[in-house]
Amino acid sequence: MNSELASRGAARVEWIRSRMPLLAATREQFAASRPFAEHRIGMSLHLEPKTAVLLETLAAGGAELVATGNHGSTQDDIVAFLRGQGMTVFGSRDDTLEQHHENVQAVIDSSPRILLDNGADLAAGVIASGAKVIGGTEETTSGGNRLRGEFAGRVPFPVIVINDSLLKAIGENKHAVGQSVVESFMRITNLMVNGKRFVVAGYGWCGRGVAQYLRALGGKVAVVEVDEIKAFEAAMDGFRVGSLDELAEWGEVFITATGQPGILTAPFFERVANGAVLANCGHFPWEIDVEALHSMAEARVQLDDAIERIDLPGGRSVVLIADGRMMNLAGREPKGNSLESMDLGFLLQSLSLERVATAAETLRPGAQPVPDDIDREIARRMLAAMAANR
């Protein structure tokens, strides 16, 4: 273990821990009740400081943890810190996609009883192998979509989808993702938002937040949304609404926030304005067809660790951020969502995992929302924490 890396990770986690009071109270509660005693939890989730505080909370409740990150977002100092705490953690920031899949398989091979998943990678492996688990949680909309679509009727254990919670949608997806994506755009590119023309693809909770925070900083914002009701909402919220074809030559920055594959594809690349910046904030790096974009390139120039210029035929070029991966957890000094929002989000995780560990038989097989009593309990705790800061 690299002691310098571990020390740096410990210092970062100490700051985060001091600003997550909801998890602090839950850590004390779990230390007394030990809901995860004799349970091994297998995790695939972004390995960054806030996640480390979540893992500490689960460990306080008696959990044995075997974990890996998501591809491209792992922070090596946090891995070193967690290993120093006796946890089994696989992966590094420079892992290839193949290595990431091997890390996920290593978690599955450890025979966890409970899954803490992000993107349904663990669930997919468990379903394929026939391994036995009592249940788990899924963090993302993308993973929830896979469980209800790709794996519909094939999930024999309960999976609580954290992103189904309206609390998370408002607190984390709209406000925290919106804020962190705009901050990450400014940090990675060093470009100004004011007066710039942005196109946000998707007007779900994350897209709403991205559009709102871009406009708050003076950006001109248009929205692309295939759902007529959401498109109507975007128009009523005062945003320009159009198709990618209509906006390809208007936009200067395009941000995908749909959770679906194949949003920016070859026909779009043929029309997009010279110099346009392309970025994604969805969980999977499939919203921008990077393979098609690279195949069209006459030249590719890496301008920074997360900025690539791609020269296209006809003298045009586009700029790709973070190779199409989740931009608010990529590039230099990735921060992700705010501490307060993740305190709420990871409390949802903690109490949902507790429900799986102690009462899995009360849950039906397959993907399902956070139980209403958990949502309401967390809302009360969050309101009390906010009131304490007045």
Image: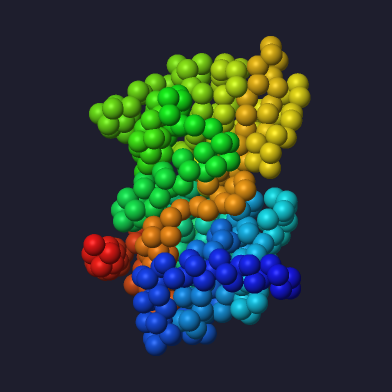
Percent position of residue 206, x then y: 41, 43
For image coordinates 48% across by 66% down, the residue present is 16
The image quadrant where one finds the C terminus is bottom left
* Observer able to see residue 89: no
* Observer able to see residue 177: yes
Using the image as rendered, state which of residue 289 and residue 249 is in the foreground: 249
In the current view of this chain or complex, which residue is farthest to the right? 299
Percent position of residue 373, x then y: 26, 67
Residue 162: which quarter of the image? bottom left
Using the image as rendered, state which of residue 124 and residue 106 is in the foreground: 106
Using the image as rendered, state which of residue 177 and residue 119 is in the foreground: 177
The answer to whether 133 appears left or right of 375 in the picture is right
For image coordinates 54% across by 32% down, the residue present is 191
In the current view of this chain or complex, which residue is farthest to the top? 314
Colouring used for the render? rainbow
Residue 102: which quarter of the image? bottom right
Give the number of marks.
Answer: 0
Percent position of residue 310, x then y: 69, 26
The answer to whether 246 appears left or right of 269 in the picture is left
In the current view of this chain or complex, which residue is farthest to the bottom? 32
For image coordinates 49% across by 32% down, the residue present is 192
Percent position of residue 309, x then y: 68, 29
Using the image as rendered, state which of residue 212 and residue 64 is in the foreground: 212
* As drawn, 293 above or below 86: above
For image coordinates 31% across by 56% down, the residue present is 167
The image quadrant where one finds the N terminus is bottom right
